[in-house]
Amino acid sequence: MRKYAIIDFSASSLSLLIAKIEGQRMEGLLHTRMPLSFSSSIFEGRVLSEVEKLEVIESAESMIELCRQNDVDRVYAIASSTLSSISEADDLISTVSIRLSLHIQKLDIAEEGEARLIANERYSILPRAVLVDFGSLSTKLYSFSNYLCTIPAGPLGLYKELVSQVVPSVREASNIKEKIRTVLDEANLPGEGYFDNAVLAGVYSWSVYQLYADYFKLSHQHGEKIMQYKKLKKLCRYLIKQDNSRSLMILRNAPEVMTQVVPAAILAKELLKRFGVSSIIISDLGVKEGILKQIVCANRSAEGLELKD
């Protein structure tokens, strides 16, 4: 039995997966995410300061140290396509690689899509299913037979553009909904009845589910996590109420993405309304799981940092 880890560098955070490997079988042991302090001020072409670059390096160092504490044999690293929103992203990757002796593979949108589908391939048995992944600045939709499209709306982008405080007001939430509907209209998505099932993946989807489970008093569930559209709609109405209980619930369940989880919930609701899907499966499997699975199955070559030496 071996332990492998993979670190994902994105424009808004660093995330880590530690997995147990037996042959070609992989089991996730630990997931953690470190949001970057400057993520809310990221815009296309922005140049990071030296202090901000140092934050990225120190965050990666702490994740490598966490891997050592968990007896990880080898660490891999990838750079999300969202990192390209930062000017001189290649220089940042090169600096981190040299400082930490960590080879970082850059991914493009197509590679990320393939990795998500590989990680969630067990859902391919569902008839007419769509896989929805909320990125910070865009939302990617995949069918299990071919890539569908990218929508230029993500929770972080919606927050930065339309929200003035930590959580949107009633008026701001209405503006978010109208913005999403306009973007979906322009994307020429298939209408109601085209998809029978939806799988939501990524950290934002998981955070929305944590709020959903808290609000509806759901106990720990084994197996799949499922949300009902009508209940999600009710949750969204609650999340735009201006009261302390709403704020405390967000802080309790989604502290890392507290400014973005309400836009994520509204985005999920509007997408599912567009498709007419009543039940939604929540998956915590994403790009890291897919890339690591490719490496373990020898379908992808990658240079890892050996820790046991």
Image (cartoon, rainbow, N blue to C red):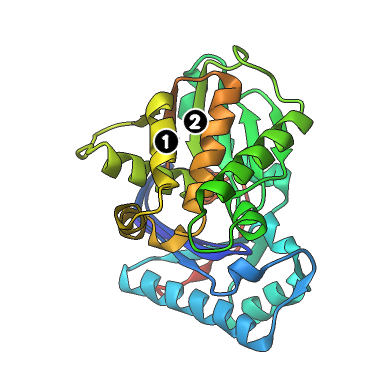
Which kind of residue does numbered mark 2 sit on? Val
Looking at the image, the residue that sits furthest to the bottom is 50
Q: Nearer the viewer, residue 65 or 234?
A: 234
Q: What residue is pinned by disc 1?
A: 282
Is residue 23 visible in the rendered image? The answer is no
What is the x, y in percent for residue 17? 43, 57
Residue in the picture at 57% in, 32% down: 270
Q: Nearer the viewer, residue 106 or 297?
A: 106
What is the x, y in percent for residue 18? 40, 58
Q: In the picture shown, does residue 193 fall above or below 259?
A: above
| Callouts 1 and 2 close, C-beta under 8 Å | yes
Q: What residue is pinned by disc 2?
A: 199
Is residue 50 visible in the rendered image? The answer is yes
Using a 10 Å C-alpha cutoff, classify the residue at mark 1 as few (fewer than 14 neighbours), some (14 to 19) or many (20 or more). Answer: many
Residue in the picture at 49% in, 36% down: 200
Q: In the picture shown, does residue 292 fall above or below 94?
A: above
Locate residue 308 relative to residue 303 in the image: left or right.
left
Quarter of the image that includes the C terminus: bottom left
- The numbered disc on residue 2 is none
Q: Secondary structure at mark 2?
A: strand
Q: In the picture shown, does residue 209 fall above or below 96?
A: above
Residue in the picture at 33% in, 54% down: 253
Q: Secondary structure at mark 1?
A: strand
Residue in the picture at 50% in, 67% down: 35
Give me the C-alpha separation between circle 1 and circle 2. 6 Å
Q: Nearer the viewer, residue 60 or 179?
A: 179
What is the x, y in percent for residue 103? 62, 69
Q: Nearer the viewer, residue 23 or 176?
A: 176
